[in-house]
Image: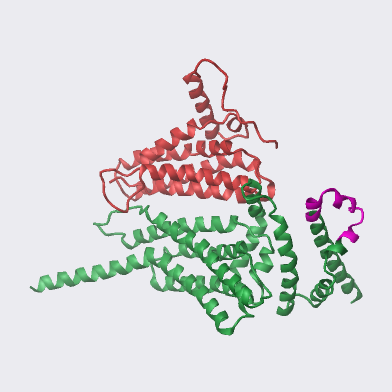
Amino acid sequence: MAEAEESPGDPGTASPRPLMRDLKAVGKKFMHVLYPRKSNTLLRDWDLWGPLILCVTLALMLQRDPADSEKDGGPHFAEVFVIVWFGAVTITLNSKLLGGNISFFQSLCVLGYCILPLTVAMLICRLVLLAGPGPVNFMVRLFVVIVMFAWSIVASTAFLADSQPPNRRALAVYPVFLFYFVISWMILTFTPQ
Amino acid sequence: MAAVDDLQFEVIYLCQMDLQMRLFRVYSKEFGNAATSVAANPDATTVSIEDPGETPKHQTGTLRGSGREEDDELLGNDDSDKTELLAGQKKSSPFWTFEYYQTFFDVDTYQVFDRIKGSLLPIPGKNFVRLYIRSNPDLYGPFWICATLIFAIAISGNLSNFLIHLGEKTYHYVPEFQKVSIAATIIYAYAWLVPLALWGFLMWRNSKVMNIVSYSFLEIVCVYGYSLFIYIPTAILWIIPQKAVRWILVMIALGISGSVLAMTFWPAVREDNRRIALATIMTIVLLHMLLSVGCLFSFAFWSMVLWEVASTAGKQNEQSQQEN
């Protein structure tokens, strides 16, 4: 499979790109993640706006209260940000070193967009936590996180697995599994102060 | 019997041909057209490259079978000479290009699984490096095994803390996220600095005493990385809050990974002074033990110990207050 062209948009236009067009492109990619099919849209027209929005949303929801000075608490905003982006870069480098023919930014784009199900899980968890703690509460959150985790893995694998030679697919997919597992763990163990 | 001899001869012949083809390919890259002109006559090329003195040893070694330790070494001797040559030729890209680093990830899925299996089942007499790595050290295994281990330790330490304090009304669950960075520093430092120190030490001893077996730095990193794999299921099973179970698990993990390391490095130091050889092996195992104590124990065991101490002190306080 030949490496798909990187197409960051129209560099030569004189007028500024309309915001609605960009938002529509991001929304279209969200749909592709929610209903994963083998399509090239995510790879061809990569952009990093979607991943940025998702990462910021997730980090805002996951961060511990800044006024809370407890030492061993949840992650700070910056820590979540660093984990997501550093993790995505590491996975991309790993995939390229193993001989995959996906470009750097395409891979970042796919991994970033596939955090969408986990962000939805975080929203649901926060809503469920408003009902008060308890074992039922925990089981509901556990179920939601597991389903969304599986969804993320399936969505990202659908896009990334094809770019690897068949005898190394498992090697390239395992770090993706680890990455989303860590994010799911952070979501599941989120406790409001 | 004649059929068996024929088969063994076939195997030897194929091994030699394979090696010759690999050598030929490597040299043809270096010498370009000059090599392609002799491509029609591979036998001529290979006779000039190969040391004829080594060939009969290689054959007799294979004929006797690879079960005996001397033959393992003999094979290791020839292999190390030839593979040092191949290894030197393999990494021919300059270190600032991407292709240079790609040579460290030149493994397939089944190879990684084989290496992990080899680290879990140390067989006496079989050398992990010679058997599984064979001059193709990879950085994929060590890096991702360390990453998995870091998260396994952090998560299981957190869970075991939670289970210990389950039911206490005053306990508020915290994810203890900062422990991940501490675990990451310790484990990656261990996986890189200890092999570096060991490699430096072995190189220094090699200059004094001629050793049959010598390892490259990446092979040592590889062995250490794969030997850490056993700690991943150990860390997960550490969630069980029974002291006896935890001690048994740590002993098993230390036994398996320690023996893999000891059996890998024993041939490298055997030729040396008896005391130095034994001291080296003991240091390797001791450092491994320190890692287990440092990582596994610190997260769950010490917190459990501290909690027990605190609770007994609290009870004594209450009793003394009631008496007063």
In the image, residue B17 sits, relative to residue A44, either above or below, namely below
Could you tell me which quadrant the N terminus of chain A lies in?
top right
What secondary structure predominates along the stretch shown in magenta?
helix
In the image, residue A71 sits, relative to residue A14, either above or below, namely below
Residue B101 in the figure: left or right of residue A58: right
- Is B44 covered by the magenta stretch? yes
Where is residue A186 shown, x and y percent of the image? 41, 47
Where is residue B225 shown, x and y percent of the image? 56, 62
In the image, residue A154 sits, relative to residue A70, either above or below, namely above
Query: Which residue reaches farthest front?
Result: B208
Which colour denotes chain B? Answer: green
Total numbered labels: 0
Query: Which residue reaches farthest bottom?
Result: B274
Query: Which residue reaches farthest left?
Result: B324
Residue A167 in the figure: left or right of residue B63: left
Which is more toward the observer, A50 or B86?
Answer: B86
Q: Could you say which quadrant of the image residue B205 lies in?
A: bottom right
Residue sitting at x 63%, y 67%:
B118
Where is residue B27 shown, x and y percent of the image? 80, 55
Residue sitting at x 30%, y 53%:
A71
Which is more toward the observer, A30 or B183?
Answer: B183
- Is A166 covered by the magenta stretch? no
How was the colour assigned to the protein in this rendering?
by chain
Where is residue B266 shown, x and y percent of the image? 61, 76
Residues rendered magenta in the picture: B26-45
Which is more toward the observer, B312 or B92?
Answer: B92
Which colour denotes chain A? Answer: red
